[in-house]
Image: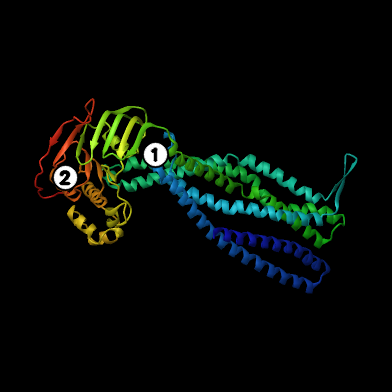
Amino acid sequence: MGLVYLAIVFAMSLAEIEITLRLISWNAAFYSALERVDAKAALLQLGVFGILIAISASSYLVKTYIKQIVAIRWRRALTAATLDRWLAHKAFWHVPPTAAEGGIDNPDQRIADDCRLFVEHMLNEVLQLIINLVALFSYVALLWKLSSFPLAFTLFGTAVEIPRYMVWAAPIYVLIASGLTHLLGAPLHRLYFEQQRREADFRYGLVRVRDAAGSIALSDGEPAERRQLDGRFGGIVQNWRRVIKRELILGCFTRPYQSTVLRIPLFLALPAYLAGHVKLGGLMQLGSAFQNVVTTLSWFIFNYRRLTELSAATVRLDNFLEMAEGVPRRKTALRRVITPAREVRLEGVTLHGPDGRALLSLPHLVLEQGRNVWLQGPSGLGKSTLIKTLAGLWKHGEGRIAVPNAQTLYLPQQPYIPLGTFAEAAAYPLNPGDLPPGKLDALIKAVGLDHRSAAEMAGEDVKGLSVGEQQRLALLRLMIAAPDWAFLDEATSALDIASERKMLSLMRETLPHCTFVLVAHREPHGMGNVRHIDLSAASATPAATVVPLPFLPAPAQSG
């Protein structure tokens, strides 16, 4: 449908070219009537002018409306394609959010703003370029027909005659002006690119303050945040000064050019009028034809700033897509394979930080399905990194990891709370409407979150959840998902022992066929007998200690 709309826009643009040609002819008829002092003919031409302008205005408004429809369709398609690449293969995780780390800065800005700028400028400037190329042939043909006379003069005693000089003067005039425009405006590409980045950095800083408002307020961190925001906004101002300075330099040429381009054609046609080759009506028609040729050829000059913005947005968007699409092709010495076996097996695995620093070495480790495991180790050892590695997120290291072809769920220490209602947060990533009636309410009550107001569950955004409540919410999601394997990375660290016991007991009862792998500093109460593996040992093997933990009754819960 978008191509049909585009075809309509193109057809209407061609119609506007015909109207312009008729307006050029109208100049000859109207001014000739004035020259003859023919009032009746002049009034008739005023009526013709009104009709042509009405048609032109109507065509412009309809064309603009259709272009806006096409723009939102194209932007929706481009945004969808960009989001597909950004979310595919977890590129949003693998690509660092800063250029300094080998990634891309502000991916959110590139998806939101660069897609918009690219579509808007492609639909306006590039489409206009195509239409101008068609129009140019019509205008040049008319100018060729009208300028049948030569320009004759004497130069250093030599007679010079330039046939149809009005046709040759137009491209030479515009070519020189275009060269000067690019010479003066070339630095704008880099400056606009940098301005987009700094604007996005500032917006991201503001979002960070909003998301961490509680922590900042408790830490009295307002002065530090203000310094950060002032520094980011200072970068905007600093680069903006360079932009306006360069735009001023460019404007010193383009503004006079735009102001005189409508008069220069008349001045160049004046010798033909003074030599008697044309009359007043012909002079005005000739000047109008030359003017349309010059303004059409001046598309590059008139649109230089927008073309520079398009160039910057295109480069940023291209870099973004190239980086996202390159994620699956990245090479790593850490192999992760999916097997039909009912176990997780690690052979010769060594994990590194992004800087190459060794974190954790596991020569041999096997986790059997149906046997719950407690992984323990000091802070900084790489326990969370191990979970990310098992999930296929961490690529820094070497060795082989075999995971079963089964439904698996990973819970981090800090749960993700999506935008939306409480019910949507509880069912995430599923749609709460797809769950059996009453199941979500029953689980919300079971995990001790039924004190949340009915209004919040029904429609309001999730607000004011403590860290303990967030972890309860994440465990609720686990019970809804009912995986075969569940890896919990300090997923109950914010709960007291009694609450932890109740939650883990509830999960064990609700998911009797799930194998739980718990990363925790303290013994996980409520899971019954678990296999204890100390990751700080030189070699973690299946012979590691099995620690029986008592299954105790759950006392009263707490936050």
Q: Position of residue 520 (x, y in %)?
A: 20, 37
Q: Residue furthest top?
A: 538
Which residue is at 64% across, 45% downward? 252
Q: Nearer the viewer, residue 316 or 204?
A: 316
Picture quarter containing residue 530?
A: top left
Picture quarter containing residue 542?
A: top left
Residue at the spot of label 1: 94
Q: Secondary structure at mark 2?
A: helix
Left or right placement of residue 554 versus residue 69 in this view: left
What is the total number of numbered labels drawn onto the structure image? 2
Q: Callout 1 environment at 10 Å: few (<14), some (14 to 19), or many (20+)?
A: some
Which residue is at 25% across, 31% downward? 365
- Quarter occupied by the N terminus: bottom right
Q: CA distance from mark 2 to mark 1?
A: 33 Å
Relative to 350, does residue 32 appear above or below in the rendering? below
Instruction: Say whether marks 2 and 1 touch (CB < 8 Å).
Output: no
Which labelled disc corresponds to residue 500? Answer: 2
- Amino acid type of disc 2? Glu
Q: Nearer the viewer, residue 31 or 467?
A: 467
Q: Secondary structure at mark 1?
A: helix
**Which of the two discs, 2 and 1, labels the residue nearer the N terminus?**
1
Left or right placement of residue 351 versus residue 198 in this view: left
Left or right placement of residue 99 versus residue 43 in this view: left
Which labelled disc corresponds to residue 551? Answer: none
Q: Nearer the viewer, residue 507 or 357?
A: 507
- Amino acid type of disc 1? His
Picture quarter containing residue 65?
A: bottom right
Q: Position of residue 159 (x, y in %)?
A: 90, 43
Residue 262 appears anywhere in the view: no
Q: Position of residue 353 (x, y in %)?
A: 34, 30
Which residue is at 26% across, 53% downward? 426
Residue 164 appears anywhere in the view: yes
